[in-house]
Amino acid sequence: MAEPLFSLDPPPGTYPYRHTQDDRFQYRAKVQPAGECLEFVVRAVDTRRAAEADYRAWAGIPRGKRTEPESDQDRDDSIRRSTERARRMVRLLSLEMGADRLLTFTTRDTYALDTLQVIWDRFCRMARAFDPSFSYIAVPEPHADKDHWHIHAAYKGWVNINVVRRMWHAAICSVTGRGKHSDTAGTRSPGNVDVQYRGKASGIQKARRIAGYISKYITKDLIERFNKKRYWHTKGVKVPEAKRKWLEADNLDEAMREVMASYGLLVDGQFPVCKVWKPGNLVFFWVHSDQLPAPPF
């Protein structure tokens, strides 16, 4: 048997199931709970790099500073990864919140994105004063002219759209100094709020639909133009910590089946997967049920 990569005793429970020089790649599952869903990500991991990362963390060796991409290809890859991470987090936050409404906030005049964020913050303070349970996940999106922005926000619960519009108008006027009129219809209105219910689905199905819908607004163009936080959300909404486990499977299909079997979700050899996405040597899949089983690891 080949010698382990490090002579020091590894931190308990962090090294792969079969970690040797001769068995470099191994499948690992990441199980992410969010609301009433479980998201599974299975990928082939370079065990040498994983062991080195575990060792650095165990030994207290700080990670090096992130460097700027050196080539256009590196920069494109970095933007693509940032876009995927932001989309995934927006989707998970929306699921955790159990969103069942999608609101779109627009302004009549054109404001810079920094100004729009100040308007949004002012609106959120008003909304929390009106309803302390107010929570959201919001994503800005540019119009076709690339200068005029609007905001999409996932929201949970019944909403009085007339009250929301008045608060949105008040937020715009208080930040921009735009004249406030008692008549806010037509051309005198500083903006508008539309609400969508995303079809007849209910419960977890509606939450999944809205989560997928709002995450699509995280685009490469948004990442490139707005190199800050690409979405805004209520601080009290947090995605639970994910669990990770090294698998014994030798291919992606076996890895999916191994994870499902460990959760007791196999029925007649099949498992209740809602969606599967296989980009290269990686697989994402989602399941949900009325009562999710407790993680076996």
Image (cartoon, rainbow, N blue to C red):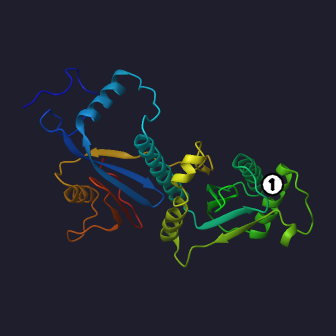
Q: Is residue 57 visible?
A: yes
- Side of 259 relative to 139 (left or right): left
Which x, y percent locates residue 190? Answer: 82, 62
Up the image or down, 176 lies above or below 291; here it is above
Residue drawn at (47%, 33%) of the image: 68
What's under tag 1, amino acid-wise? Ala
| Nearest to the observer: residue 112 or residue 197 | 112
- Side of 127 relative to 19 (left or right): right
- Side of 176 relative to 268 (left or right): right
| Nearest to the observer: residue 103 or residue 68 | 68
Q: Is residue 185 visible?
A: no
Up the image or down, 142 lies above or below 243; here it is below
Residue drawn at (15%, 33%) of the image: 20
Residue drawn at (84%, 57%) of the image: 170
- Side of 188 relative to 262 (left or right): right
Residue 105 image-quadrant placement: bottom right
Which x, y percent locates residue 100? Answer: 58, 67
Q: Quadrant of the N terminus?
A: top left
Disc 1 target residue: 171
Which x, y percent locates residue 56? Answer: 34, 25
Up the image or down, 204 lies above or below 115; here it is below
Q: How many marks?
A: 1
Is disc 1 placed on a helix, strand or loop? Answer: helix
